[in-house]
Image: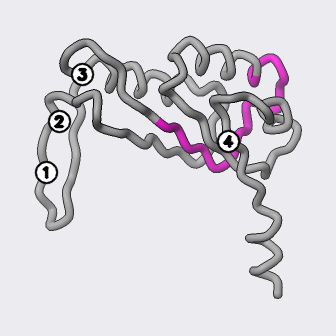
């Protein structure tokens, strides 16, 4: 697989490698299983020079996870398999799924209540 990027100014290129000091943020609007996101983490980790791991954060706006506790547990298991340098960040817009992740050391659940409150004022 290849990884392409676009810089400001419309310069396009192919990313050949990463360094352990680099930081990657993978963003998606929602996920059901996380397989694409975790596949992306695995791809960038295989591209790190020197065989070390680098920090990767996955941000998902809405953790749908097919509204199934078993799917959420599977996502948590995949996250832990990737190790502590991989973090998962999501919002609490779907409490039935995100409540299952609260307290996990590799997960941040962002409360959107204040944001929504500011919008309606």
Q: Which type of secondary structure does the marked residue at label 2 adopt?
A: strand
Q: Which residues are magenta?
A: 57-72
Q: Which type of secondary structure does the marked residue at label 1 adopt?
A: strand
- Seen in the picture, residue 113 relative to 83 is either above or below; the reply is below
- How many callouts does the rendering have? 4
Q: Tell me the residue at 66%/34% (across/down).
A: 107
Q: Tell me the residue at 75%/24% (across/down).
A: 72
Residue that mark 3 sits on: 47
Residue that mark 4 sits on: 108
Mark 3 and mark 1: Cα distance apart in space: 19 Å
Q: Which badge, 4 or 3, comes first in the chain's sequence? A: 3
- Tag 1–tag 2 contact (CB < 8 Å): no
Eye-nearest disc, 4 or 3:
4
Q: Which type of secondary structure does the marked residue at label 3 adopt?
A: loop
* Residue 11: percent from left, percent from top: 11, 57
Residue that mark 2 sits on: 15
- Tag 3–tag 2 contact (CB < 8 Å): yes
Eye-nearest disc, 2 or 4:
4
Tag 3: Cα neighbours inside 10 Å, few (<14), some, or many (≥20)?
A: many
């Amino acid at each position: 697989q290849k990884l392409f990027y676009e810089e400001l100014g419309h310069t396009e290129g192919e990313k050949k490698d990463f360094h352990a000091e680099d930081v990657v943020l993978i963003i998606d609007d929602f996920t059901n299983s996380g397989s694409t996101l975790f596949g992306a983490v695995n791809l960038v980790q295989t591209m790190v020079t020197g065989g070390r791991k680098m920090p990767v954060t996955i941000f998902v706006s809405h953790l749908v996870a097919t509204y199934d506790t078993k799917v959420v547990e599977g996502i948590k298991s995949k996250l832990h398999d990737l190790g502590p340098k991989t973090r998962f960040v999501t919002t609490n817009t779907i409490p039935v799924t995100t409540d299952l992740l609260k307290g996990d050391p590799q997960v941040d659940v962002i409360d959107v209540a204040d944001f929504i409150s500011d919008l309606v004022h």
